[in-house]
Image (cartoon, rainbow, N blue to C red):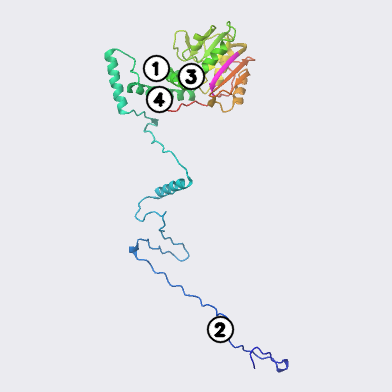
Amino acid sequence: MKPFEVPPWEAGAEIIEFKPVNPSGNGVAAAKKPKKKKPRKKKAAASGETPQVSKAPGKFSYRQGGGPLAPPLDSSDDDDDVEDGIRAMHKVKTGRIEKQRPPAQATKGGKKELKLKPELAQAAVEAMEAMEATGSSAPAANSLASKLQSELLGGRFRYINEQLYSVTSKKAEALFRKDSSAFEAYHAGYRQQVEKWPTNPLNRIIKTIKKVPKTAIIGDFGCGEGKLAQSVPNKVYSMDLVAARGDIIACNITDTPLQAQSLDVAVYCLSLMGTDLNEFFLEANRLLKLHGSVYIAEIQSRFEDVREFVRCLSACGFDLIKKDVAVNYFYFFQFKKMRHVPKNTKLKPFSLKPCLYRKR
């Protein structure tokens, strides 16, 4: 029987065997035999690579790589140092540049210690000895001693400033009563800050008061050195926690000795310090006549929500007449007393954000 020949049906079914095709004879390529994988030779320990860790079947085995970003084999750094290095390389790759932060100041009992440069301290000692010998109290201009004095003054001002913003008026009064020199130190540092401002808000308050009738009686709450009283022809009651002059009334401005409804105008120029401003304005409501005015000047950054501030003063009996919040650095307000609110009225305490001055 010839290959691929189908037998006739009448011959019956039989098994047909096909002869194998000769690959060289008909030009059809034979199937390639699978190559056997050669077993990988283990590198010697002297080559420098870490040998592969053998584990149980089915588990992942780890072998340290040898790429350009791989840590050195003899490195003793811990995981935190490796992570820091990877973060640093990522920042360089993405173009991020970070300024180096100065090391944290040493603390003692949870408080920062003021470290002075040795040359400044020595110069201060020599200057003080010279002043004692000559009887002079003024430091030499542009000397290291004056720089030291300015540094100490600024540091103490910032400390007292933070205290006044974070306590009630009664605690602030106790602070100045305990340390009589704190008030002068605070205002000396305050004068340094005023020189750096684009404008002094008190000058605008003085111009405003000069426009009211000369018979109007003014109450300057938190007057400081009492410059308003020296600048206007009106009768001015200057009040602060400490009296810097003989004509200033030393008192807590939430509880003054003045008669009820004895003022026509109340002024708060950068004096809304403390966590109980509701007590400030309840006292102002007691002292002001009906339809009396309140003038306020404060630093812009202290206000989170001006409308909330206006609502708080409305609860104290004052309606907003005019506001100027377009001026850079300072906000100015004018309120008018429209109703009497008893001093013992229980209101929710409110305050403004503290104004914290940075070290320059």
Q: Secondary structure at mark 1?
A: helix
Whether residue 52 sits left or right of residue 260 in the image: it is left
- Give the amino acid at mark 2: Pro
Question: Within 10 Å of the Cα at label 1, are there few (<14), some (14-19), or many (20+) other Cα atoms?
Answer: few
Instruction: Say whether marks 2 and 4 touch (CB < 8 Å).
Output: no
Q: Which residue is mark 4?
A: 155
Q: Which residue is mark 3?
A: 170
- Give the amino acid at mark 3: Lys
Question: Within 10 Å of the Cα at label 3, are there few (<14), some (14-19), or many (20+) other Cα atoms?
Answer: some
Q: Which residue is mark 2?
A: 23
Q: Is residue 64 above or below residue 115?
A: below
Q: CA distance from mark 1 to mark 3?
A: 18 Å
The quadrant where residue 124 appears: top left
Q: Quadrant of the N terminus?
A: bottom right
**The magenta stretch spans which residues?**
293-299
Q: Position of residue 48 (x, y in %)?
A: 35, 61
* Mark closer to the chain start, 1 or 3: 3
Residue 111 appears in the rendering: yes
Q: Which residue is mark 1?
A: 181
Q: CA distance from mark 2 to mark 1?
A: 112 Å
Nearest to viewer (mark 4 / mark 3): 4
- Give the amino acid at mark 4: Gly
Question: Within 10 Å of the Cα at label 2, are there few (<14), some (14-19), or many (20+) other Cα atoms?
Answer: few
